[in-house]
Amino acid sequence: MIRVNVNKAILELVEGDITTQDTEAIVNAANSSLLGGGGVDGAIHRVGGPKILAECKKLGGCPTGEARITTGGNLKAKYVIHTVGPIYTDGTDGEPALLNNAYQNSLKLASQHKLKSVSFPSISTGAYSYPLNEAAAIALQAVINYLKTHPDIELVRFVLFGHKAYLVYEDVLKKLQTQPEQDRKR
């Protein structure tokens, strides 16, 4: 596990299972229907139970880059923030901006609901084929940028499935910490 301070918040990287996290909210890498799927989405719906799906049905879907919030059902987390990351084609179809928006909009929902802690998976890097290195850089920078101006969130945890994903995020975070401030804003 790695912990770094960003403004008044803690940013953590852990290897593990998103469905077991005790943060106030966990983020679901959902599809646009919000009706469940494979990977993280399927696991959250399986562990969280039918209450999550019932609330998702009322929401009527979620466009790519946006986020919606439901109960956590049977999860330890009180809430699930569902966000839809982009399907990666070649990186020139707006994917970086959409992925950034998925993280930013998830955090905005957390702030609106006065949540202090959120756990994220690595959005779009499974079935949606976003290259892990590129996705990690976008994810970490999006969260860091948000935390710098939103002291209401005290903990953001990236819960990475598998040691490879953890090592990639760890490497990217170390590089971001050593870059001069002006280079990170580009």
Image (cartoon, rainbow, N blue to C red):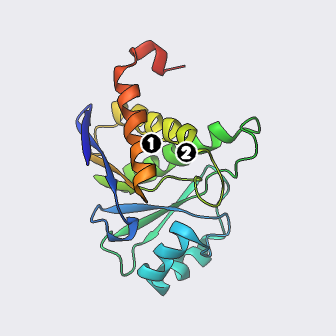
Q: Is residue 37 left or right of residue 80?
A: right
Q: Position of residue 157 (x, y in %)?
A: 33, 51
Q: Residues within 10 Å of mark 2 (few under 14, many from 20)?
A: some
Mark 1 or mark 2: which comes first in sequence? 2
Tell me where residue 172 sits by quadrant.
top left
Q: Are marks 1 and 2 in contact (CB under 8 Å)?
A: yes
Residue 114 visible in the picture: no
Amino acid type shown at disc 2 = Leu
Residue lying furthest front? 164
Q: Tell me the residue at 45%/50% (across/down).
A: 165
Tell me where residue 2 sits by quadrant.
top left
Q: Please, what secondary structure does the residue beneath circle 2 have?
A: helix
Amino acid type shown at disc 1 = Val
Q: Tell me the residue at 50%/46% (across/down).
A: 103
Q: Position of residue 174 (x, y in %)?
A: 35, 30
* Tag 1 residue: 168
Residue 28 visible in the picture: yes
Q: Which label was assigned to residue 32?
A: none
Q: Tell me the residue at 59%/75% (across/down).
A: 36
Q: Position of residue 16 (x, y in %)?
A: 35, 62
Q: Position of residue 59 (x, y in %)?
A: 60, 70
Seen from the viewer's position, the closer of residues 86 and 63 is: 86
- Work out whether 113 lies above or below 99: below
* Tag 2 residue: 132
Alpha carbon of mark 1 to alpha carbon of mark 2: how far? 7 Å
Q: Tell me the residue at 55%/42% (across/down).
A: 135
**Quadrant position of the C terminus in the picture:** top right
